[in-house]
Image (cartoon, rainbow, N blue to C red):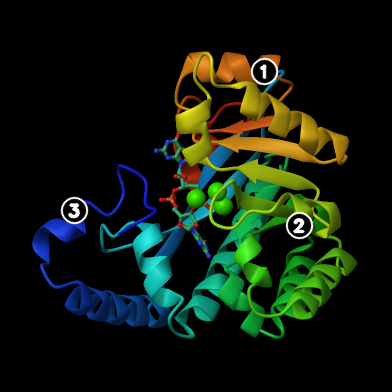
Amino acid sequence: AKNLGKNECVYYNAHMKDEALKRKDIKIIIDEACNQDGFYCVYQPQVNALTGLTEGYEALVRLKDYDIPPNQFISVAEETKAILTIGRLVTKQVVEQMAMWRQHGLELRPVAINFSSKQIKDKTYVQYLKELLEEHQISPELIEIEITESIFMNNNEKAMKLFKDFLSIGVRLALDDFGTGYSSINYLTYIPVSKIKLDKSLVDIYLTPGKDTFIKNIIRLVHCLGLKITVEGVEKKSQYHRLRKFGCDYIQGYYFSQPITGKEVEDLKNPLK
Ligand code: C2E
Ligand code: CA
Ligand code: CA
Ligand code: CA
């Protein structure tokens, strides 16, 4: 349970003592959910730091019948092929949701989809995504794929080939969880991403008075490379104001909104507000 946010992985731990048993149970729950439409997505607004308007969403998967945080069940799913199934189910739901939003008169905004590094094993994922977008006539520029640096762990060439494939169908790439794990500035200079997402853990530590030069300079660095930056996990007005002052592009955090359902996105009177 390392590396998880404060509010995550609480409830389930309280009931199960044995970590291995717990993972085994989660495996069963995941397999069942894969077979029975047991997942759904929620959407967290990504807000333009300058205007305060919502300009996109990140899709985040949830289990329908269990209160197990995604960090927890995704890491179990990543031990098996289940993550490939979940990756496709989420993708399909997102594209269908976008088609639905359009049908209901909403002006579509970009939606980010998380792509687990393990999904590199899904050799036809890009083709799958391409066909889904064609089927529902959703423009690929409206899809952003969030990758993490761990995708380079095994094979750099394979990862770079995958990125090229993504770009060739017209979707954009974002580098997620920047500032955690083995982040290296080196990657930024050659991964073809258009956006960096700065992790909440750095926000919590450094986005405080007297300590925020670091974040200010990360934003500068990202801009020097011609990329956009989204800062995640912004919970306080003071953090928002500092980020806006630093020229941060997008903000995603509870200060603006928690993840909401597809229906709630529709219920926002004006999807731009
Ligand atoms: P992530 O990709 O870094 O997603 C951001 C997480 O931060 C989300 O947690 C979001 O609800 C949370 N968050 C956003 N703003 C705030 C804030 O202001 N305060 C706090 N405390 N938290 C905030 P969530 O939905 O629990 O997802 C956790 C992780 O699970 C994600 O981290 C991602 O790594 C993984 N995940 C979620 N959905 C998917 C998916 O569809 N596919 C894959 N492969 N992974 C997913
Ligand atoms: Ca993400
Ligand atoms: Ca993230
Ligand atoms: Ca994260």
Could you give the CA–CA distance between mark 1 and mark 2, rounded to whole angstroms? 26 Å
Q: Name the residue type under label 1.
A: Arg
The residue indicated by pointer 3 is: 11
Residue picked out by circle 2: 187
Tell me where residue 7 sits by quadrant: top left
Q: Quadrant of the C terminus?
A: top right
Mark toward the viewer: 1 or 2: 2
Q: Where the N terminus falls, by quadrant?
A: bottom left
- Residue 54 appears at what percent x and percent y? 64, 30
For label 1, the residue is 244
Front-most of 140 and 161? 161
Q: Is residue 157 above or below residue 46?
A: below
The tag earlier along the polypeptide, 3 or 1, is 3
- Assess whether mark 2 and mark 1 are in contact (beta carbons under 8 angstroms): no
Mark in the foreground, 2 or 3: 2
Give the tally of numbered discs.
3
Which label's residue is closer to the chain start, 2 or 3? 3
Marks 3 and 1, Cα distance to the nearest angstrom?
35 Å
